[in-house]
Image: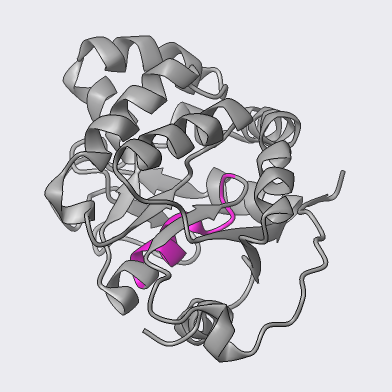
């Protein structure tokens, strides 16, 4: 399969019906390397919402050697999705924090129908519900290039790219001075496996959210300078 994307025909909504003042509980989904993280950070600034990134929390747990981290590490190194109960427990704890009361951006969660159902239960217990799912599409070869050239800092989690986002000093993190590494799951062979896993296990969630009219799509291949305007076009003004 050359493209990791889903084509969903969505109805046209006038801008006033597309977002309004209530779209503050947002999920951003897409294949690994599609640009979810970049868009989530920009959205967080535009709409003044906290970004809840499960991947960062899992990597932090692995780095710190916590029990959850030890459980997650094997899955991550094999390029497999981390077991649902591990991820759900992390998300549930995060959803209980006071900074998400007015809204949030969930980056990379849920990744299975079971996780989506668990999220519904979590939000229901909190007396709220999801507003919109933003799905990022990208070509497979674009994703492989992005991830295989990516380098990360194991100390602070900062991300760099050997083509598009070089550090000031080669191999050294600008933020904390840590030595940059290529994550095991950013190697080409594992990337392809991750995309296969993603396609098999994650696409059903989009169908689930599309049935209730919550899905909006955005290209993951536009220039980074165009992203803020594209977000406003798809989700509406802040």
Colouring chosen for the image of the structure: one colour
Dividing the picture into quarters, in which one does residue 191 lie? top right
Left or right position of 177 against 23: left
From the viewer's side, name the closer residue of 172 and 155: 155
Taking the spot 64% from the left edge, 51% from the top edge, the residue there is: 143
Query: Is 88 drawn above or below residue 65 in the view shown?
Result: below
Q: Quadrant of the C terminus?
A: bottom left
Total numbered badges shown on the rendered structure? 0
Left or right position of 196 against 112: right
Any part of residue 177 in sight: no
Query: Is 3 drawn above or below residue 55 in the view shown?
Result: below
Percent x, y of residue 228: 45, 82
From the viewer's side, name the closer residue of 94 and 130: 130
Q: Is residue 41 magenta?
A: yes
Taking the spot 22% from the left edge, 55% from the top edge, the residue there is: 101
Taking the spot 69% from the left edge, 28% from the top edge, the residue there is: 197
Any part of residue 120 in sight: yes
Query: Is 186 drawn above or below residue 165 in the view shown?
Result: above
What secondary structure is the magenta-colored segment mainly? Answer: helix
From the viewer's side, name the closer residue of 81 and 63: 81
Q: In which quarter of the image is the N terminus?
A: top right
* Magenta span: 32-42
Percent x, y of residue 167: 29, 60
Percent x, y of residue 115: 51, 30
Percent x, y of residue 104: 32, 57
């Amino acid at each position: 399969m050359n493209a990791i994307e889903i084509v969903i025909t969505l109805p046209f909504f006038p801008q006033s019906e597309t977002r309004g003042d209530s779209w503050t509980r947002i999920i951003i989904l897409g294949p690994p390397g599609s640009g979810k993280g970049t868009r989530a950070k920009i959205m967080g600034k535009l709409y003044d919402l906290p970004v809840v990134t499960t991947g960062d929390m899992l990597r932090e747990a692995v780095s710190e050697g916590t029990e959850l981290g030890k459980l997650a590490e094997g899955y991550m190194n094999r390029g497999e999705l981390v077991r649902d109960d591990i991820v759900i427990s992390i998300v549930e704890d995060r959803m209980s924090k006071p900074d998400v009361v007015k809204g949030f951006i969930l980056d990379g969660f849920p990744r299975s129908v079971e996780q989506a159902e668990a999220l519904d239960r979590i939000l229901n217990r909190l007396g709220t519900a999801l507003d919109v799912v933003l799905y990022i599409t990208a070509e497979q070869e674009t994703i492989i290039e992005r991830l295989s050239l990516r380098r990360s800092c194991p100390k602070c989690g900062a991300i760099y790219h050997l083509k598009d986002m070089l550090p000031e000093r080669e191999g050294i993190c600008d933020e904390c001075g840590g030595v940059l590494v290529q994550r095991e799951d950013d190697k080409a062979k594992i990337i392809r496996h991750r995309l296969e896993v993603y396609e098999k296990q994650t696409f059903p969630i989009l169908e689930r959210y599309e049935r209730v009219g919550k899905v909006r799509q955005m290209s993951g291949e536009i220039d980074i300078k165009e992203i803020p305007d594209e977000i406003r076009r798809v989700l509406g003004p802040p």
